[in-house]
Image (tube, rainbow, N blue to C red):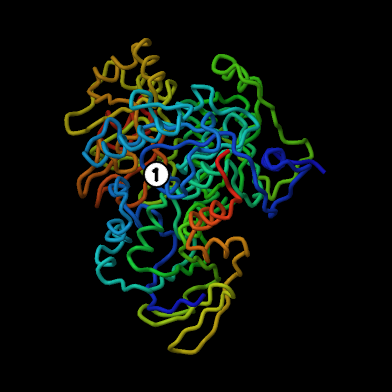
């Protein structure tokens, strides 16, 4: 009987011939990622255990990205604490504030590879599944356990297969694909399950788009989201890693709990409305809603192609004075690329405030918190009540929708501006 | 392991931003975190909740961010256990790992009204409404998870392994 990607990867990681959904296995961890917010309590718990070493320093990555540079003394204290941990325990890889968001930096640096099991103290760790791994978010105490033992128990999840067909229409992007999926599957629809994103639309999608999809697997409750590694995956990795890895693909006769088919050939831009990620509507249903702030960036949509799409809409135009457009390239590499291509200039000329790569206001950190009664449209992945400021509302959309909306000061269909 | 306390009823899809808002993620002192539990939904909760109280909620409790600060805030505000129809998986594991019992049972509306007292037997999953006498049974928690709860959380369990020589520096 054929096996899917999750079953194969967890079997390999737990040293078993094969595994089945529902089975509890203990898997060896290939890489553990910590950032300063949830990494600090993880390190505090690890220190309580009293071991002198982490299980394998070469398999631990620490990155400062959530509130970077530190906006407050408390945040600065967390940075200092994590730097001390890195030094004391000889942590293999450390990125200080200059690199950017964990979920963009780790793939860029070739640290996450097909066939691996990767865990991070962040729910969007599922992003790396775009390269064909099993990667999932865990809590701080759990991470302390991983630092001590290098293994973690998993209940092998069922897998849902989502098959997408059709060419994406003009001004419709991977973000619209995942928002549409969210609306249909709902926020609990994939709870405890792995998601395999497949089909011709995905095969035609670049790695960045696949990352946008996998990034939001958790928003449906997904344990992990992944895409079968293919030539695009190999091309991405060729210039980033010389390490060997195993391509693990689903068998042709793999078994899934459910297979859903989606046709995106007539998909409209989508918008997730306050205060739930699955409160998704076609843009035609929400156009015209006034906004105060538009934010472009994050681990969901902070890549060069996202900034480029926004810049194409903003080029030569000016964002009205009563709208704040804030931009967060997801990493130093993205920022440099955008500088070289003149994208940053276009954005700044339009009136955007371009910030350093970091998570910024996404989870209520800094650089764009909102006041009561304000409305923001962002390319982020969550719009829970109060997340970016008490009494403020958040809409989620694609880079093109965010750029078009910034220009008009209202939620706007980018196709109208073409 | 018996837990007895006053019930606080919450609805469905209670996310971790509401349980512990993002601006407090920089706080590392659990007692301080406890002062902000459920602040996103009910800012008076931390002042009114008493030690030993029990949260009873609908489906998908703890959805959203993986922040362990959420179950920590609940635990240190005084909440002794959570009973819900279903949990987001990261929250579920986090709660177990910090020694906060989390029980799963269908249709939690029938268990108790807010303010009523219930008694929970964590090991058998039995929930008793002390006012009405009605008894309900939650899904049993697997043994290895009960072991973690008995040790007060994962760190307690690992420290025991280190003390017994079962886990050493590699």
Residue at label 1?
A38
**On the rendered image, what quadrant is the C terminus of chain A found in?**
top left
Instruction: Answer with the quarter of the image where residue A266 lies.
Output: top right
**On the rendered image, what quadrant is the N terminus of chain A found in?**
top right
* Residue that appears at 70% across and 51% down: A21
Where residue B94 appears, as percent x and y from the top left, is 48, 55
* Residue that appears at 36% across and 10% down: A340
- Asked whether residue A217 appears in the rendered view, the answer is no
Asked whether B124 or A86 is in front, the reply is: A86
Residue at the far right in the pictured view? A1
Residue A395 vs B157, above or below: the answer is above
Asked whether B104 or A145 is in front, the reply is: A145
* Residue that appears at 40% across and 37% down: A35
A57 sits to left or right of A48: right
Q: How many marks?
A: 1
Mark 1 nearby-residue class (10 Å; few <14, some 14–19, many ≥20): many
Instruction: Answer with the quarter of the image where residue A15 lies.
Output: top right
Asked whether B123 or A71 is in front, the reply is: B123
- Asked whether residue A129 appears in the rendered view, the answer is yes
Residue A366 vs B64, above or below: the answer is above
Where residue A188 appears, as percent x and y from the top left, is 52, 54
Where residue A123 appears, as percent x and y from the top left, is 47, 44
Asked whether A120 or A221 is in front, the reply is: A120
Q: Secondary structure at mark 1?
A: helix
């Amino acid at each position: 009987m054929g096996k899917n990607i999750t079953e194969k990867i967890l079997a390999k990681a737990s040293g078993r011939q094969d595994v089945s959904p529902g089975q509890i296995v203990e898997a060896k961890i290939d890489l553990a990622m910590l950032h300063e917010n949830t990494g600090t309590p993880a390190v505090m718990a690890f220190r309580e255990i009293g071991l002198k070493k982490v299980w394998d320093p070469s398999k631990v990555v620490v990155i400062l990205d959530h509130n970077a540079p530190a906006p407050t003394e408390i945040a600065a204290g967390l940075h200092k604490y994590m730097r001390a941990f890195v030094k004391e325990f000889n942590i293999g890889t450390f990125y200080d504030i200059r690199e950017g968001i964990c979920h963009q930096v780790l793939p860029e640096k070739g640290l996450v590879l097909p066939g691996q099991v990767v865990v991070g103290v962040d729910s969007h760790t599922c992003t790396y599944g775009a390269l064909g791994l099993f990667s999932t978010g865990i809590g701080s105490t759990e991470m302390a356990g991983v630092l001590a033992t290098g293994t973690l128990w998993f209940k092998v999840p069922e897998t849902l297969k989502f098959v997408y067909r059709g060419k994406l229409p003009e001004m419709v992007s991977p973000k619209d694909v995942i928002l549409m999926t969210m609306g249909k599957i709902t926020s609990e629809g994939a709870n405890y399950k792995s998601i395999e994103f497949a089909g011709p639309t995905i095969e035609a999608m670049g790695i960045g788009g696949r990352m946008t999809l996998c990034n939001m697997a958790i928003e449906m409750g997904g344990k992990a989201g992944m895409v079968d590694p293919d030539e695009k995956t190999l091309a991405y990795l060729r210039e980033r890693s010389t390490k060997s890895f195993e391509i693990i693909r689903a068998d042709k006769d793999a078994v899934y709990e459910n297979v859903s088919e989606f046709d995106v050939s007539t998909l409209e831009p989508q918008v997730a409305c306050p205060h739930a990620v699955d409160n998704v509507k076609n843009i035609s249903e929400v156009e015209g809603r006034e906004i105060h702030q538009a934010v472009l960036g994050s681990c969901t949509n902070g890549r060069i192609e996202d900034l480029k799409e926004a810049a194409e809409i903003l080029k030569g135009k000016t964002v009205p004075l009563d709208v704040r457009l804030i931009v967060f390239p997801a990493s130093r590499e993205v920022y440099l690329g955008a500088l070289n291509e003149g994208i940053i200039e276009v954005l700044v000329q339009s009136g955007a405030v371009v910030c350093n790569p970091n998570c910024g206001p996404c989870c209520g950190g800094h650089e764009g918190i909102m006041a009561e009664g304000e409305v923001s449209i962002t390319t982020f992945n969550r719009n829970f009540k109060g997340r970016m400021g008490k009494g403020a509302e958040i809409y989620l959309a694609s880079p093109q929708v965010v750029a078009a909306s910034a220009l008009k000061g209202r939620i706007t269909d980018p196709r109208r501006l073409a | 392991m018996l837990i007895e306390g006053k019930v606080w009823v919450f609805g469905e899809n209670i996310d971790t931003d509401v349980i512990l808002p993002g601006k407090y993620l920089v706080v590392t002192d659990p007692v301080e975190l406890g002062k902000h539990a459920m602040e996103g939904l009910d800012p008076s909760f931390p002042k009114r909740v008493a030690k030993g109280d029990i949260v009873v909620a609908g489906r998908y409790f703890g959805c959203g961010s993986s922040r362990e600060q959420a179950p920590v805030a609940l635990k240190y505000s005084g909440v002794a256990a959570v009973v819900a129809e279903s949990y987001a998986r990261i929250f579920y594991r986090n709660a177990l790992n910090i020694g906060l019992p989390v029980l799963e049972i269908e249709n939690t509306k029938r268990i108790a009204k807010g303010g009523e007292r219930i008694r929970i037997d964590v090991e058998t999953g039995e929930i008793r409404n002390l006012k009405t006498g009605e008894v309900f049974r939650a899904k049993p928690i697997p043994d290895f998870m009960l072991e973690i709860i008995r040790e007060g959380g994962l760190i307690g369990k690992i420290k025991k392994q280190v003390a017994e020589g079962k886990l050493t520096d590699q």
